[in-house]
Amino acid sequence: MRNLGFVCLLLLFFWEGHAQTLVKPEIEIGIVEKLGQTVPKELKFCNEKGDTLTLGSLINKPTILSFVYFDCPGLCSPLLDGISDVVGKSDLVLGKDYDIITISFNTKDTPEKAKEKKVNFVSKINESQRGSWTYLTGNLPAIQKITEAAGFRFKPTGEDFAHPSTIIILSPTGKITRYLYGISYLPLELKMAVKEALKEQPQPTSNKIFDYCFAYDPQSKTYTLQFARLLGTFVVILTLFFVLYLYLSRNKSTKAKNE
């Protein structure tokens, strides 16, 4: 038993030492999930028509929240196209079952740019529903408050920004209930997220696993699979199982001889 305890402690030591890479004390670019927290609904932004609105006036049903900037050469357009695509494929009705809010985190973006950008991504949506997808621009304090409240971390890189690709599901009260990662989404995935938001039920996601398996490349503005990191994890796990196997085999052999 003493030897088994030693082996268990040894395995735990090796695993925890390796697993610490799963935990990032400070994320500069990416998502810090804030499930169950409520976004500040008093913040004011301008919509694509130039009207000043509070978030609270827009959030009264399950809402998809996305962050982009309108001159983005990489992730933003595929993200918005992914939202448009899933809206067109879903049996949920935009404007009835849920709304969409897209906020630019670039203070240089204007309502005019928002209007131009919106036209590009509502073509797949029924014309009667297009008004329920709102594009917003704002000043720096408002942008900083909403992105921090949502756990959306981005960083200026010259004229562009390094940023994650994620949509955030809000409940009718503005509570964060789900994060969906990537640039494409399944209709069933959206439907489940909307139902959870309607019930005010936050659901955990695989954020740590996602961050561990993929890394954002500011140059290509894409996520890349971390082959070396995953291979290292596999080797560590395989080694732990091998050590455990040797111990159990040796222990079994010793008992057989004693008998």
Image (cartoon, helix red, strand yellow):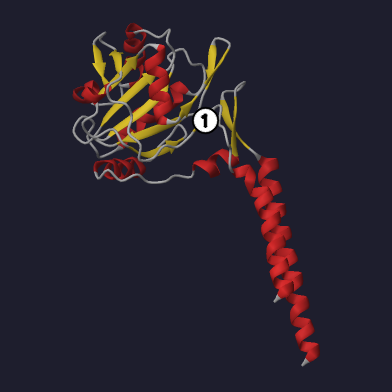
Camera-side residue: 31 or 128?
Answer: 31
Q: Is 59 drawn above or below residue 113 in the view shown?
A: below
Q: Quadrant of the C terminus?
A: bottom right
Q: Where is residue 167 drawn, in percent x and y?
A: 40, 32
Which of the 4 quarters of the picture holds residue 124? top left
Q: Where is residue 49, by image quadrant?
A: top left
* Of residues 197 and 148, the one drawn nearer to the viewer in this rendering: 148
Give the residue drawn at x 70%, y 72%. Answer: 4
- The kind of residue on which mark 1 rests is Gly
For residue 57, side relative to residue 163 (left or right): left
Image quarter where the N terminus lies is bottom right
Name the element at disc 1. strand
At 40% across and 30% down in the image, what residue appears?
150
Residue under label 1: 30
Residue 246 drawn at (x, y percent): 76, 70
| Foreground of the two, 104 or 25 | 25
Q: Is residue 164 above or below residue 111?
A: below
